[in-house]
């Protein structure tokens, strides 16, 4: 039987990426700047596991669209271009 960390990605992220950083701090002790700092570290390291999967998949690639907001808001045209190029292969 797979572990709960394998089955539920949210639990995995909490246990491996967030809880070790904030340890036994109460929610009230975690500032918005603490969260911004953690997000900046995650963003800076990229997604190495995802990159490995993409690299090992025939025709796979990881694409970043700079400046994209939530659900690629304000970058819809760039997203369409990337998908169209992928589909044309």
Image (tube, rainbow, N blue to C red):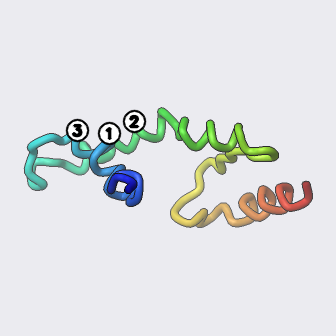
Helix, strand or loop for disc 1: helix
- The residue tagged 1 is 37
The quarter of the image holding the N terminus is bottom left
Query: Is the C-beta separation of discs 3 and 2 under 8 Å?
Result: no
In the image, farthest residue toward the top: 45
Left or right position of 82 against 21: right
Q: Note whether 84 is above or below 67 in the view shown.
A: below
Circle on res. 58 = none
Q: Residues within 10 Å of mark 1 (few under 14, many from 20)?
A: few
- The residue tagged 3 is 20
Residue 8 drawn at (x, y percent): 38, 60
Residue 12 drawn at (x, y percent): 35, 50
Mark closest to the chain's N terminus, 3 or 1: 3
Q: CA distance from mark 1 to mark 2?
A: 6 Å
Camera-near label (3 vs 2) is 3
Q: Look at 62% across and 47% down and name the residue there.
A: 66
- The residue tagged 2 is 41
Helix, strand or loop for disc 3: helix
Q: Look at 68% across and 45% down and name the residue there.
A: 62
Q: CA distance from mark 3 to mark 2?
A: 14 Å
Q: Residues within 10 Å of mark 3 (few under 14, many from 20)?
A: few
Q: Note whether 10 is above or below 33 in the view shown.
A: below
Helix, strand or loop for disc 2: helix
Q: Note whether 56 is above or below 28 in the view shown.
A: above
Residue 29 drawn at (x, y percent): 10, 48
Mark closest to the chain's N terminus, 3 or 2: 3
Left or right position of 77 against 46: right
The quarter of the image holding the C terminus is bottom right
In the image, farthest residue toward the right: 88
Q: Note whether 68 is above or below 66 in the view shown.
A: below
Q: Residues within 10 Å of mark 2 (few under 14, many from 20)?
A: few
């Amino acid at each position: 039987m797979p572990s709960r960390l394998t089955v539920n990605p949210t639990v995995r992220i909490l246990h491996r990426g967030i809880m070790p950083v904030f340890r036994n701090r109460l929610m009230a002790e975690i500032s918005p700047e603490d969260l911004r700092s953690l997000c900046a570290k995650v963003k800076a390291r990229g997604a190495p596991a995802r990159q490995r999967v993409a690299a090992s998949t025939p025709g796979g690639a990881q694409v970043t669209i700079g400046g994209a907001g939530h659900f690629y808001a304000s970058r819809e045209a760039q997203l369409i271009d990337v998908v169209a190029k992928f589909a044309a292969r």
